[in-house]
Image (cartoon, rainbow, N blue to C red):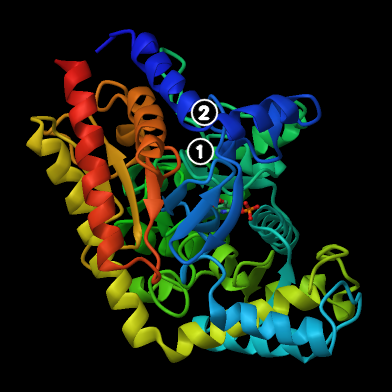
Amino acid sequence: MTRNHAPFLADLAAAYERHAPQSAALNERALHYLIDGGSHSVRLKEPFPPRIVSARGAWLQDEDGHHILDFWQGHLANILGHNPQVVTSVLADAFQNRHGLQLGMTDRLQVEAAEIICRQTGQERVRFTTSGSLATMYAILLARAFTGRNLVLKVGGGWHGAQPWGLKGVRYKTGDSGGYQHTESAGIPATVTDEVLVTRYNDSDQLRDQFARHGDRISCFLVEPFIGGGGLMPAAPEFLQTARELTHQCGALLIHDEVISGFRFRAGDVSALYGVKPDLLTLGKIIGGGMPVAAVAGRMDIMELAGREKGNQVKFFGGTYSGHTSSFIAAKAMLTHLVQHEKEIYPALSENGERMRQIVVAAFKEQGIYACCTGGGNEVVPGSSLWMVHFPHREDVRLDTPEKVFDPAVCDTVLNHQVMDLGLLLENVHVMGGHGAISVAHTEKDLEVFNQACRSLAHRVCQYLK
Ligand SMILES: Cc1ncc(COP(=O)(O)O)c(C=O)c1O
């Protein structure tokens, strides 16, 4: 599978440039001022991203006037679609009648949001911040301070944000020294690189081995119960249970990073579905209702290290904009809505997520190409609202670890991601790196639009692969 896809991808890029001349022109302008034309690497598609002028529900409009069906949904935060009325109405009211911009003080909204999070996750205390990256960083600081140990164990393919301990073992490297044992960013203190151990997702034997060798020096095991950037797959129940037992035995903390999975499968953490309670839980994305809110929730005896009585040992200060008024107006509205409508929202998301996955697989099958989608569930987790497409794919490999998802011998991810992204944009459908999420705002008609777009894309790919 060493075919050179460059000419095919260049053709797609050229077609997209003709399709979106205003976005292309804005990109030229952006490159004069912004690194790569923007401020989040993932969003800066090549050759250029569509520049958006409005967003509502399932749909976007770009500078070129295209109506684009969106499955990226606010970087996977917008479970109710873009700008849902349940959030915008309370924000509008606050801006009109009270306050909305930075207050730099505190109010009842944070209390109410924290109450909901504690009630729905069974955790004892919460502290808020503004991004998932900060939440996982603070959680690690708490774990290191609590245990007095340095090592952080994480899984290969686990993305926990751009913070020092998160920047090892994120992207799969091929070749002899490949895998997930490398650091992603220059500029990180060497000690951090040495302090992060990387183990394989869903591999309990390797986890036992890590704890047998380093157990008395491990401060925490940081893991997503449903891995996001590593390929959208649920943890095997036995893996999480093993993690819980080993961390207990070795005096390490278990941190579940639920920045993606929190409030996505139920109105609370997905950990609860596994019956595994982590010592610390990180949340982000959905809980902010479209505003920058993230949180660490956890055991009182650990969280209190950030508190006054313990001399603020861990400087979990949250940041100037933490607890921002507008953020908590949105967060409270979103959390309240998700709790109140849990019974309708989550089964619908799970069902429609499954339909999305089936649509993709069927569209490729029609053209004789084997594709599969991750994002489905297992014996404890219902399928998610998420899907990631893998094609052309080896039929005999079951995807359960990031190593398999990103192994070029199993699936051609380079072709896969770029073709999905650009090919679907030409059909006015937006996904990111071959993956996406359905929201409550997506209708039957939208699913049909997606179906037609996937069929056109699969036809295009088939013409190329033939
Ligand atoms: C599991 C997980 N943890 C942490 C983060 C970092 O969150 P943020 O982008 O809000 O900093 C992400 C971001 O996608 C994530 O998926």
Which residue: 71% across, 81% down? 92
Give the amino acid at mark 1: Val
The secondary structure type at the circle numbered 1 is: strand
Disc 2 + disc 1, Cβ < 8 Å: yes
Q: Count residues near mark 2 (Cα–Cα under 10 Å), then give few for <14, some for 14-19, many for 20+.
A: many
In the drawing, does residue 290 fall left or right of residue 311? left
Identify the residue position indicated by label 2 in the image: 181
Q: Kindly indicate the quadrant of the structure image that contains residue 410.
A: top left
Mark sitting on residue 311:
none
Which of the two residues, 44 or 304, is positioned nearer the viewer here?
44
Instruction: Specify whether residue 117 is in view.
Output: no
Which of the two residues, 446 or 188, is positioned nearer the viewer here?
446
* Place of residue 46 in the rendered image (x, y in percent of width and height, measured from the top left): 53, 26
Identify the residue position indicated by label 1 in the image: 198
Q: Earlier in the sequence, mark 2 or mark 1?
A: 2
Which residue: 75% across, 60% down? 145
Instruction: Specify whether residue 36 is in view.
Output: yes
* Place of residue 43 in the rendered image (x, y in percent of width and height, measured from the top left): 58, 40
* Place of residue 390 in the rendered image (x, y in percent of width and height, measured from the top left): 27, 36
